[in-house]
Each structure stands twice: as C-alpha cells, then as structure tokens.
Amino acid sequence: MLGDTLLIALYAAAGAAAAGLLGTTALRLVRHRSVTLSLAVVAAVTVAAMLAGTMLVAWAMFLSDHDLWVVTMVCSMAAVVSLAVALVLGRGVVRESEALARATRAFGDDGSFTPPATAPLAELAVLSRELAATSAKLAASREREQSLEASRRELVAWISHDLRTPLAGLQAMAEALEDGVVADPGVYHARIRTEVERMSGMVGDLFELSRIQAGVLTLNTARVSVYDLVGDAIAGADALAREHGVRLVGAGVEPAPIEVDGREMSRVLANLLVNAIRRTPADGTVAVSAQRRDGSVVVSVTDGCGGIRPEDLPRVFDTGWRATDARTPPAGAGLGLAIVRGIVEAHQGRAAVRNVPGGCRFEVHLPAAA
C-alpha cells in the first residue's frame, strides 16, 4: 500500500514538474508583455500541472477509457474557468494600472497628483498613496522655494535702497567738504562716520545671513550659564537703552546651563534687545527673563512696542521684514530677526514671537544642557 502511494506521488510530481518547467519558460518569454497574459499563463500552468499529474497516474493505474475521459473533461472545465477568471482579473489590474499611469503623467506635467477614482489593488493603492505624499512634499517645496525667491528679490530691492540713500548722503557731504562750503566740517565728519558705521553693520549682517543660509555657520559650542549671557547682553545694551529713555530690566533670569556658541548667542540677544529698545517708547520697559521649561531653556525679551498685527506675526523672522515700510533708521535693513532665527535653529532651537499686553514677547527656546 505504501509503495503504491509513493508511486502515485512520484507520477503526479513528475507531471506537475514538467508542466511547471514549461510554464516557467513561458513566463520568461512573456515577462515584458501585459500582466493579463502572465496571469493566463499562471492559470494554465496550474491546470496543466494538475492534468499532467492526473493523466500520468491514470495511465500508470490503467484506468478505463471512460474514467480517463471523465478525468480529462473535469480538468478541461477547470482550465476554462481558471483562464476566464485570470483574464478578468488581468484586465482589472491593467485598467487600474493604466488609470494610475495617467494620474502619474499628470503628476509629471503640472506637479499635482490626483489618485484614480476607482479603488485599486492593495499594492497599487500603496503606490498611489506614496505618489500623493510625494506630490504634497513637492508642492510644499515649490511653495517654500517661491517664498524664498520672493524674499530674495525683496531683500535685493530693499538693500539696494538702503545702500543708495546713505551713499547719496556721503557723496553730497564729500562734495560739500571739497567745495569748502561747510561752516563746521567736524559736523560733516561725524555724520560721515555715522553713515559708514551703519553701512558696515549692514554689510556685516548680510555676510552673517549669507553664512547661515548657506549652511556654513560654524559653531564653537561650550557649556555656559544663561545667567551670564543675559547679564552681558544687558550690560552691552544699557547705553542704547539710556539714550532712548528705556528701562532695561533683567527679571527672573535662572542660572541654567546651556551648550551654545557664546559669541553667536550673544549676537542673538543683542539683536533682540536692540530691536526691543528701538521700538519701545521713552519711559517704557524692556524686560529680559530666562527660565527652564520642559527640558529647554527659554530666554524671552518683552518690549512695549504696542504689539504686532496678527497677520504679520508669521513673517516677523523673514529676511527683510520690518514692522514699518520706512527704510531709514531705526527701521534698519530688516536682517536682525532673520539672523536670530538662523543662529537659534543652528543650535537646534527655535525662535518665536507673540503679542502680550502693551507689546510683544520674543522667545528663544534652546536645549538645556544635561
């Protein structure tokens, strides 16, 4: 009994193997053709393997002609049904693939991807979702690129204006000095020096901003106390605060350690304090604080500018933005806050701003040192 079972298994395996070998060859020949044809070949191989194994076993067992005919008929019907199902399934896959291909071509033409209306197979659905996600990323990237390009154009126009005005003044003062029509040359010399210093500061800001945007800003970080940083920044801005009649207050400054580049972070605090002092009216107050908050150290500068329009808040740290359309001091070139954001983000932190009663509060969030 065991021997007969083994013999039947061998005959069936031989027939199925022969059909499988032929099917593999056929699949290799049609691998570059339609998926419908490939599915039909798979269905045909399945039925052929069963039929070949059955025929060999029937021949070995010497079945009657009638029994052999019955077996052949059953296998033939199975083959017809299998091929029909394979063709229907193949046509469905082809239609879904063509719909996805059309959507992908549109994606390449206009940059937007609209998934096919029909629900595709699971694998095609995954591909469709990936294409939709890629389309969204590309759209966001294009929007950022357009925004940056617009910002660069505005910056070039603004800087050109900012440089043209002092240069025209310098030229006029130099000509007046050459012609000897100035009653007090020392006054003109002082003005020339002031304009040159302002232009030098503008060029320095442009250089710093270019390093930040190019990603070549090198940080020499060290463990420092935020208390010392804030204290030095307040001391450096005290003269400007007295000149504008503004009270500079350091309240609630905790001695929290942070890992930062002291020079660059001092520039951040100086830019925030200068910005706050210049926009706070006389007899106003600029308050500085530093506190630990959720694993971060938050340094805040609160001024008395009266607040920023809500629609302008998202643009505060953009290159060239300023709260006024004026292009003369104290408006500046509109680079200070952009530099603040760039330096803070280079330290893996973030800069934020929000309105508070009577003014606005700029916050710098930095990772706290362990």
Image (cartoon, rainbow, N blue to C red):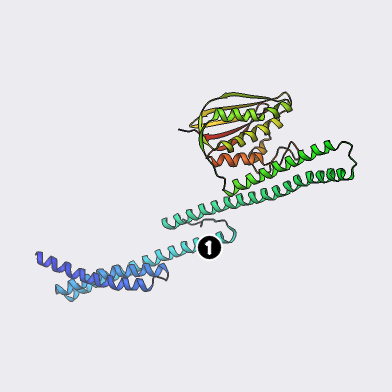
At x 56% / y 36%, what residue is drawn? 262
In this rendered view, identify the residue nearer to me: 287 or 36: 287
Report the side of 89 relative to 53 (left or right).
right
**The residue positioned farthest toward the bottom in the image shown:** 65
Report the amino acid beneath label 1.
Arg
Between 99 and 182, the one nearer to me in the picture: 182
User: Could you tell me which residue is drawn at 28 percent across and 69 percent down?
Assistant: 47
Q: Which residue is mark 1?
A: 102
**Which residue occupies the extreme left position in the image?**
1
**For numbered disc 1, what is the local secondary structure?**
helix
Q: Nearer the viewer, residue 308 or 240?
A: 240
The picture quadrant where one finds residue 209 is top right
Residue 261 image position (x, y, % from top left)? 55, 38
Residue 214, image x, y percentages: 59, 49
User: Which quarter of the figure has residue 267?
Assistant: top right
Asked if one can make out residue 148 in the rendered structure from this viewpoint, the answer is yes
The answer to whether one can see residue 63 in this image is no
Residue 14's x, y, as percent? 21, 71
The image quadrant where one finds the C terminus is: top left
Left or right position of 347 against 153: left
Q: Quadrant location of the N terminus?
A: bottom left
Vertical comparison of 281 with 35: above or below: above
Give x and y (percent) for residue 65.
18, 76
Residue 8: image quadrant is: bottom left
Number of marks drawn: 1
Viewed as shown, does residue 60 lie left or right of 240? left
28 versus 111 height, above or below:
below
Residue at 26% x, 69% y is 49
Q: Is residue 237 above or below residue 315?
A: above
